[in-house]
Image (cartoon, rainbow, N blue to C red):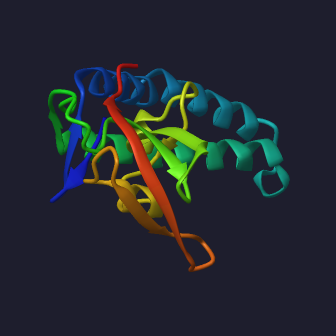
Amino acid sequence: MTQTSDNVTWLTQEAYNKLKDELEYLSGPARTEIAAKIAAAREEGDLRENGGYHAAKEEQGKQELRVRQLTQLLQNAKVGEAPADDGVVEPGMVVTIAFDGDESDTMTFLLASREYASDKIDTYSPQSPLGVGVNGKKAGDDAEYELPNGKKAMVKILSAKPYTG
């Protein structure tokens, strides 16, 4: 679970370990693999018309960008506890909302950064319009957020529980 303020990123131990493992892989074995791809493509001849070479170089650039992002994130990380189970919406909470007060039209999501995203549950960033609108609210509160078209939407917070994985 992450929350960014003043360039400090708060992470659970699980999230920190996951990101550290990813960084170690990208900095070691993945670099070796991409270097081998580039070398193999280079041996194919003319680099100006070598699609495999250009694709491998692009992949290398994306990989190095992720290494820099992870390095910076982990340097500024503070490992902490999961949020309190007090019903207040904050990063690290699984939030259930109802749209326009219609309690049959609900959505449940994890409020966290993309580094903590899971295929088990939808994840919304605390900096997203919905995240900004619900952050700090309690179960039972109404929250307003801005839609992509500039209009405002209302939701009701039904529950907020700490994410347990």
Residue at 19%, 41% in the rendered image: 75
| Foreground pick, 146 / 20 | 146
Q: Please, is residue 12 above or below residue 74 in the view?
A: above
Q: Can you give x and y, in whole percent of width and height, for residue 46 in the image?
A: 81, 50
| Foreground pick, 93 / 29 | 93
Residue at 63%, 47% in the rendered image: 57
Q: Please, is residue 116 above or below residue 148 in the view?
A: above
Residue at 65%, 37% in the rendered image: 38
**Quadrant containing the N terminus in the rendered view:** top left
Taking the image as shown, residue 145 lies to the left or right of residue 19, namely: right
Quadrant of res 77: top left
Q: Can you give x and y, in whole percent of width and height, for residue 111 in the image?
A: 39, 43
| Foreground pick, 12 / 96 | 96
Q: Can you give x and y, in whole percent of width and height, for residue 82 in the image?
A: 22, 28
**Quadrant containing the C terminus in the rendered view:** top left
Residue furthest bottom in the image? 150
Residue furthest right in the image? 49
Residue at 49%, 64% in the rendered image: 154
Image mark count: 0
Taking the image as shown, residue 120 lies to the left or right of residue 115, namely: right
Taking the image as shown, residue 7 lies to the left or right of residue 135, namely: left
Q: Can you give x and y, in whole percent of width and height, for residue 47 in the image?
A: 76, 52
